[in-house]
Image (spheres, rainbow, N blue to C red):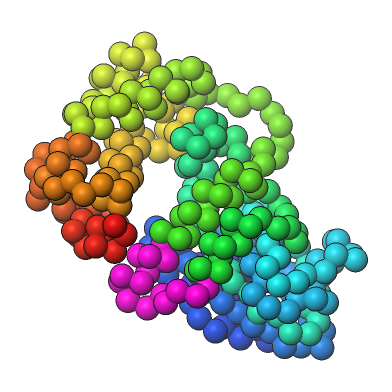
Amino acid sequence: MPHAVFRTLHGTNAELERFAWLGDELAVAIWKRQTDAAETAYRQPGHHTLSFYLGGGYRTQRSELPGQYGAPRMLCTLPDDHDSRWLIRGDLRFLHLYFMPRHFTRRAVLELDREPREVTLADRTYFANPTIERLCERLAAMPWDGADAQLRANETAHAALSQLLLSQSAPRRGGERLRGGLAPAVRRRLSDYIEAHLHLPITLGMLAELACLSEYHLARMFRVSFGMPPHAWIAARRIDRARQLLGAANLPLQQVADACGYADLSHFSHRFRAAVGTAPGRYRWLFS
């Protein structure tokens, strides 16, 4: 288990009630603790954690924030580089959603018009957000066993990550001026062009011409400003578009494949299954 927060809890008196990998390097767990007094410390875990109190926590506090106590429905966000110590007293049951920083910041381009390297998850202790709370309650209540159940939980987790980005993002530490990358106007131009032309072949040369750069420099600066190479960004956006169409419209699968720029239905089905973990038709049945 690569998630440091999970490993830390596993070495304490916390009891793991449920755990599942959800795909996309997302993991979810429900823990419970019953103790007179115990301390837990997290040291730069290298991944983000969303914590949601399902029950208890009235005498649980973060050592750095004396006088603030938990309660059911309270949320905490623990970014990848944070340090914290927690004093737990009494009963506590909570849900943890573990995710890598790239799953949070990749959304920055589309949802915040920011470069992924500009933002991170805020370090917040005991806050309320009704939308995120409902998503966490839904995630805790749904089954996680089996491919279909994990896919539904994956979608709920991604919805929670989008809400986190909108409400709990923070500038990265340091405040130094970012070097390299694309000018904001060029980044927007490229993003808009890709979104409008997902149904067509898109080449590195086309993007370079649009940005008035050589293919070599465009490839390097695109990776800096989008968090991944052009081909990977385009492939991910095609999968995202396909998921939207399958969940919201009753189009024939061939039309979905055409709208997302796949050569044929077989190619679309292969790519979609590899990325999402299930066939397009099955995905439609689950979410339409």
Give how far across and how far down residue 198 sits, in percent.
25, 32
Please say whether residue 232 is visible from this viewpoint: no
Left or right of 288? Residue 36 is: right
Left or right of 2? Residue 237 is: left
Residue closer to the observer: 54 or 146: 54
Left or right of 10? Residue 277 is: left
Name, please, the residue furthest toward the right: 67
Give how far across and how far down residue 123 sits, in percent.
71, 52
State the predominant SS element of the stretch in magenta: helix
Q: Is residue 207 above or below residue 121?
A: above
Q: Residue at position x 75%, y 76% from top? A: 57
Image quarter in which the C terminus is found: bottom left
Q: Residue at position x 9%, y 50% from top? A: 266
Question: Could you say which quadrant of the image residue 50 lies in?
Answer: bottom right
Q: Residue at position x 20%, y 37% from top? A: 259
Please say whether residue 19 is visible from this viewpoint: yes
Q: Is residue 47 above or below residue 186?
A: below
The boundaries of the magenta stretch are 140-154
Q: Is residue 144 magenta?
A: yes
Give how far across and how far down residue 193 sits, in percent.
33, 23
Q: Residue at position x 30%, y 13% from top? A: 209
The count of marks equals 0
Residue closer to the observer: 240 or 142: 142
Residue closer to the observer: 109 or 248: 248
Give how far across and how far down residue 180 sits, in percent.
52, 23
Question: Could you say which quadrant of the image residue 71 lies in?
Answer: bottom right
Left or right of 114? Residue 42 is: right
Q: Is residue 237 magenta?
A: no
